[in-house]
């Protein structure tokens, strides 16, 4: 098991060495997913998806065919944490970039939570952080499109830095313009215009795939971005200094490629 999950939990709760070890030895079945490939369907489930590398997104497909991404899952994120209690996965999850995703047995996680109070507390706080983030995304929808985009970029910077996957003020923007459009509810054509506007205002610099922020405080002020909702402790506090989990953890390394999910399930259907 990758230590990304342990690192993510330690931003919420102080975990003992025994608890960290128990999490790192969780049984899992890592698989590789290509961009636009579905990872997990909605409905009943006895397993939860844990993103080890790449970016995935939960989405809602409208009757007219339009897709709306309602949340992003980054390395270390446990998807649909409510399924621990309900056994139900809410919305479908699909890869937005090449992803490695571990499939964790629900029974193993609930067993650890019952045995280790620290793990139970960490999972509870992780669920609260997910709810808090959903509320902020709802609020962000009421902002002008330029501010919505700036807010999303701020969130990506903070979350990636917390996992050691971004620099002081830059990160690799691996999401496509279609993904960005679906995440903030605008058209694909509109995305390019907004990014150009942010660049011309010197709020961002974009040399694909690297996005740099010349003045982080200025971008945050423009986006009305307060990282508190992410519940990442020092990871998002001004001026976005080095991430500080509640307890030191081993350096996270991406899971080496194991097998492609498509190899077992057959060719991946091309979305219309």
Image (cartoon, rainbow, N blue to C red):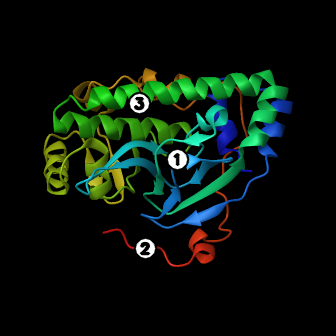
Q: Could you tell me residue 47's position as x and y percent?
A: 67, 48
Callout 2: helix, strand or loop? loop
Q: Could you tell me residue 7's position as x and y percent?
A: 66, 37
The residue labelled by disc 1 is 165
The quadrant where residue 153 appears: top left
Q: How many labels does the image show?
A: 3
Mark 2 closeness class: few <14, some 14–19, many ≥20 residues within 10 Å: few
Mark 1 closeness class: few <14, some 14–19, many ≥20 residues within 10 Å: some
Q: Could you tell me residue 149's position as x and y percent?
A: 25, 40
Callout 1: helix, strand or loop? loop
Q: Give the Cα distance between marks 2 and 3.
A: 30 Å
The residue labelled by disc 3 is 134
Between circles 1 and 2, the one closer to the viewer is 2
Between circles 1 and 3, the one closer to the viewer is 3
> Which residue is painted at 67% across and 53% down in the image?
103
Between circles 2 and 3, the one closer to the viewer is 2
N-term-proximal mark, 1 vs 2: 1
Question: Which part of the image, by quadrant, shows the C terminus?
Answer: bottom left
The residue labelled by disc 2 is 269
Tell me if I can see residue 78 in this picture: no
């Amino acid at each position: 098991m990758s230590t990304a999950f342990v690192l993510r939990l330690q931003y919420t709760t102080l975990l003992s060495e025994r608890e960290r070890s128990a999490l790192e030895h969780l049984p899992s079945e890592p698989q590789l997913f290509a961009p636009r490939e579905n990872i997990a369907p909605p409905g009943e489930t006895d397993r939860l998806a844990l993103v080890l590398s790449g970016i995935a997104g939960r989405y809602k497909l409208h009757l007219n065919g339009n897709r709306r991404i309602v949340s992003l899952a980054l390395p270390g994120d446990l998807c649909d944490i409510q399924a621990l209690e309900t056994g139900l996965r809410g919305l479908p999850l699909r890869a937005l970039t090449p992803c490695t995703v571990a499939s964790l047995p629900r029974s193993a996680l609930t067993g650890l939570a019952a045995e280790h109070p620290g793990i139970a507390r960490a999972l509870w706080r992780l669920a609260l952080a997910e709810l808090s983030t959903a509320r902020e995304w709802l609020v962000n929808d009421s902002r002008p499109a330029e501010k919505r985009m700036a807010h999303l970029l701020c969130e990506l910077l903070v979350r990636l830095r917390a996992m050691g996957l971004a620099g002081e003020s830059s990160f690799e923007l691996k999401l496509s313009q279609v993904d960005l459009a679906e995440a903030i509810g605008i058209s694909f054509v509109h995305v390019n215009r907004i990014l150009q506007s942010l660049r011309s205002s010197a709020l961002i610099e974009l040399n694909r795939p690297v996005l740099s922020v010349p003045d982080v405080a200025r971008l945050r002020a423009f986006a009305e971005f307060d990282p508190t909702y992410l519940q990442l402790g020092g990871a998002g506090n001004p001026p976005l200094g080095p991430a500080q989990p509640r307890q030191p953890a081993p350096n996270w390394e991406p899971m080496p490629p194991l097998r492609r999910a498509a190899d077992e399930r057959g060719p991946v259907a091309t979305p219309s």
